[in-house]
């Protein structure tokens, strides 16, 4: 048992009466939740302070730095969201420019909004073969920095939701040549760097700040994440100040104990568990070669030479020759086979694999895909088409009228999407998951963009930022 949990359990057994928060007084009478409440304390004496760690929490954070070989690590109990908000806030200020990949999570745009910063977007290439955004290239970053030398930081996401990994080392070299820090949103890559069997983590490739959602791919409680800092390019005190601002002043010790416990577990079991994962994946991916319509996205599918690595534990199932949407496949998997996947896009689905997966789980997934192929083949024969046309979300970068922060205070009106051509959008429009905005406040809705949004909506997808009560309505800036 790790130190923090041991201490919490010991404390809960003492007869100390709690005239302090939390209000459940560690006595909530519930058969399942009761044991959690028994160790759910707040920052009382002897239990350190997440906002200024000097004792047991600092020791645990150092354990994380050692595991990931980072210079310094901070615990986040408000997800990578808190880390991204802090990393951007601590590196850019009002009107400062930041180079940011356009396929970033909404928390990055929220940080830009809060800091009134000025984003310079990089659009990763669109991999037409699989209809997925590709990696960010060092050349593109260099081009942007050349054109905008006043930038204060570079922010990219790697791996992406689909497991695409950019060439971090080259991007870090470019950013450093301009004296700028590279921030990597590695929310989907907390398992990287822990085993030679998977690609390296950005922590080891020159990134200055790396944010990882340990809860996404490793056995840690939901909401837990890490922010690692390397080198001296970033002002650590500033980052710490913002981490403290974006996290609750009453952190959950259940979550903190979960982090501490998880770190010990990984350290002790990583070689065995990563080997098991790789073996399971090898068998599964090999089996999938026998499928008729479904193809697992792998780099070898690319007809052009793109620079990226692919994390194999992110299982992206694509298809051709059959006319179905990802949401339809997701529904079949859940309703007919009891398998819940991570997300569906129009043209693919994503399943997250990890070190806690079982051989049995992979077997079920493969059998379900096999069965679904038969089912769809039957449907196609009966001309009972499931839905859909093929959707490609290749759009020209939208024209930007205002910075996201400049929208605040403007008069807004809610109008029909089809009537919103050339209007300035006032809300983020995105599919969740993954939560990557398709349109950002301040951008102009072109006819082409509206056409693509409608394609999403008509394929049965719910887009945040568009109200769907009988008709499609969108908030735009009043003219
Ligand atoms: C790429 C990316 N970054 C950041 C986040 C935010 O992570 P968290 O849920 O840990 O706050 C997500 C969430 O899905 C994400 O997909």
Image (cartoon, grey):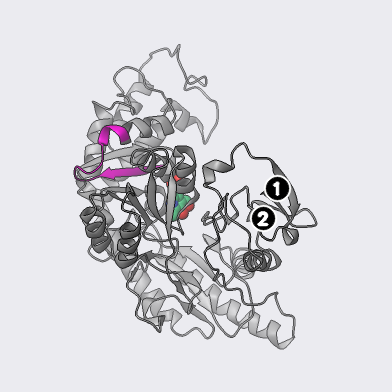
| Drawn side of residue 252 relative to residue 473, left or right | left
Front in this rendered view, residue 464 or 358: 464
**Which residue is denoted by mark 1 in the rendering?**
479
Q: Which residues are magenta?
A: 221-238
Rounded to the nearest angstrom, the CA distance separating label 2 from label 1 is 8 Å
The image quarter containing residue 332 is: bottom right
Front in this rendered view, residue 452 or 117: 117
The location of residue 459, given as percent across then percent down, is 68, 68
Mark 2 vs 1: CB contact within 8 A? yes
Q: Which of the numbered marks, if any, corresponds to residue 423? A: 2
Query: In this rendering, which labeled residue sits more in front, label 2 or label 1?
Result: 1
- Of callouts 2 and 1, which one flags the residue occurring earlier in the amino acid sequence? 2
- On whether ligand 1 comes within 8 Å of the CB at mark 1, the answer is no
| Drawn side of residue 372 relative to residue 454, left or right | left
The location of residue 343, given as percent across then percent down, is 54, 61
Q: Secondary structure at mark 2?
A: loop
Magenta segment includes 17? no
């Amino acid at each position: 048992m790790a130190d923090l949990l041991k201490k919490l359990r010991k404390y809960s057994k003492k007869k100390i009466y709690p005239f302090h928060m939390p209000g459940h007084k560690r006595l909530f009478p519930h058969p399942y939740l009761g044991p959690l409440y028994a160790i759910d304390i707040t920052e009382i004496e002897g239990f350190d302070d997440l906002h200024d760690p000097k004792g047991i929490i600092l020791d645990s954070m150092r354990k994380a730095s050692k595991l990931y070989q980072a210079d310094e690590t901070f615990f986040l109990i408000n997800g990578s969201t808190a880390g991204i908000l802090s990393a951007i806030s601590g590196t850019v200020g009002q009107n400062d420019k930041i180079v940011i990949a356009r396929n970033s999570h909404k928390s990055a745009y929220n940080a830009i909004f809060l800091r009134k910063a000025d984003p310079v977007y990089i659009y990763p290439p669109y991999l037409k073969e699989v209809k997925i955004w590709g990696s960010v290239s060092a050349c593109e970053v260099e081009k942007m920095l050349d054109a905008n030398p006043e930038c204060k930081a570079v922010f990219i996401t790697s791996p992406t939701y689909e497991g695409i990994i950019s060439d971090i080392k080259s991007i870090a070299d470019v950013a450093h040549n301009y004296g700028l820090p590279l921030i990597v949103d590695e929310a989907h890559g907390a398992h990287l760097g822990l085993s030679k069997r998977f690609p390296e983590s950005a922590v080891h490739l020159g990134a200055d700040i790396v944010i990882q959602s340990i809860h996404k791919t490793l056995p840690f409680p939901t909401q837990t994440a890490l922010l690692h800092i390397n080198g001296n390019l970033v002002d650590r005190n500033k980052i710490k100040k913002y981490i403290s601002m974006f996290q609750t002043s009453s952190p959950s010790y259940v979550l903190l104990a979960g982090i501490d416990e998880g770190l010990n577990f990984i350290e002790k079991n990583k070689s065995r568990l990563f080997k098991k994962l790789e073996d399971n994946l090898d068998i599964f991916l090999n089996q999938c070669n026998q499928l008729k319509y479904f193809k697992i996205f792998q780099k070898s599918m690319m007809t052009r030479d793109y620079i990226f690595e692919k994390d194999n534990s992110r299982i992206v199932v694509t298809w051709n020759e059959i006319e179905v949407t990802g949401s339809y496949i997701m529904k079949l998997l859940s309703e007919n086979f009891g398998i819940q996947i991570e997300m569906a896009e129009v043209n693919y689905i994503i399943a997250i694999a990890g070190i806690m997966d079982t051989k049995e789980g992979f077997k079920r997934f493969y059998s379900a895909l096999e069965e679904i192929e038969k089912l769809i083949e039957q449907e196609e024969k009966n001309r009972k088409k499931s839905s859909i046309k093929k959707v490609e979300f290749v759009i020209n970068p939208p024209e930007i009228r205002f910075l996201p922060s400049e929208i605040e205070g403007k008069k807004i009106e809610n109008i029909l999407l089809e009537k919103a051509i050339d209007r300035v959008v006032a809300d983020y429009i995105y599919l969740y998951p993954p939560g990557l905005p398709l349109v950002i406040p301040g951008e102009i809705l072109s006819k082409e963009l509206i056409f693509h949004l409608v394609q999403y909506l008509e394929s049965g997808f719910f887009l945040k930022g568009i109200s769907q009560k009988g008709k499609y309505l969108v908030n735009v800036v009043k003219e």
